Image (tube, coloured by chain):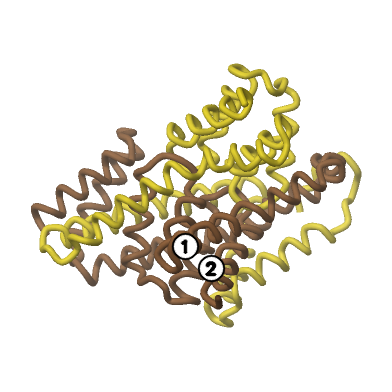
Amino acid sequence: MLVYWEIFMAFFIPGILGYGGGPASIPLVENEVVVRYGWMSVQEFSEVLAVANSLPGPIATKMAGYIGYEVGGVFGAVIGVFATVAPSLIIMIALLGVLYKFKDSPKVKRLTLFVRPVIAILLGLMAWRFFFESYEGIGLVHTAIIAIASFLLIERIKIHPAFVILGAFIYGGILL
Amino acid sequence: MKTQWQLFLAFFRVGILGYGGGPASIPLVHKEVVDTYKWMRDEEFGDMLALANTLPGPIATKLAGYIGYRVSGVIGMLNAILATVLPTVVLLIVLLSTLASFKDIDWVKGMTAAVIPVVGMMMATLTWQFFDKARKGMGWIQTILLTVAVFVFLYILNVHPGIIIAVLIATALLIRDKKKEKGVKS
């Protein structure tokens, strides 16, 4: 029973604090799943994130569903997705009239504005942890080659991330 | 029954075709809801999107849930959310479980190790995008000051990120607006 409560909390908090859509809640999820509850190592979390990123669909619920399933089976998956989706959806449906009045208010615009730097830091540190983990695992040269190659392919040549992840799988399968 | 099937189909397509997380799939939702099935007019959709953005949490399921609710009540809401979420969650669980059963083979270890820097790079790019938006919204100096302050609280004083965000949300709501209708940028 406790584990279901923990799954609920682990996804409820990112769900109500992640301003900027699903991707903004990823570092908050990582904080709960890796740092707080220790359900996964940094490496495992980054693998899940990699495969999740190579599939279509919203990222936050994919992560919640998979991690919930790993920790507490099918019921765990349902709770993870529910905790991610329900709070803000219920507020949206229930408070529509009130929200409508405030949608152009400077207060509301400030919300996203203020939260953004926090999300940026959390994302940056998560990126740093991934790079460090990789440096310890496969060394500086391979890490640098893969990171630079994937940056050029995704951001400059605009190749679809799913293919780049597939490419990394092949690179790793043969060379590492 | 037909409506439920259409709802399911609309959000199934959005879920299965939208790459890059929820925010990237908004144009797909717009196409289904406004162009294909005409459940909403264009202005209504814009208003709804603005409302959804005033709330935290993943955007794709907020839209799916709200549109489903508008079109056919609670059943429609559940239907639209399931159609958005379920296909890719199941796919992810199947893929990762398969991968996990081979994880002791050497070349599979190599594969999973090689993917970490790619994800690191994606997160670094996302980090830059968030910083860039923050800078455009409030300027360099405030962004840097806020960033340093948040960093100190997070990693030197070990405050839970949730508490920091909650305090910032409260601050954003409590600051008094200098003038009505004049997009204050402080």
User: Mark 1 — on which chain does it sit?
Assistant: A
For chain A, what colour was chosen?
Answer: brown
Q: Amino acid at mark 2?
A: Ile
The image quarter containing residue B180 is top right
Q: Which residue position holds label 1?
A: A68
Q: Tag 1 or tag 2, which sits nearer the N-term?
A: 2
On screen, residue B92 versus residue B142, left or right, reads left
The image quarter containing residue A126 is bottom left
Q: Is residue B169 visible?
A: yes
Task: Check the image and report above or below for B144 versus B37.
Answer: below
| The chain in yellow | B
Quarter of the rendering occupied by the C terminus of chain B: bottom right
Q: Nearer the viewer, residue A156 or B142?
A: A156
Q: Residue furthest front?
A: B1
Residue A66, position as x, y percentages in the image: 42, 57
Q: Which mark is residue A7?
A: 2
Q: Amino acid at mark 1?
A: Gly
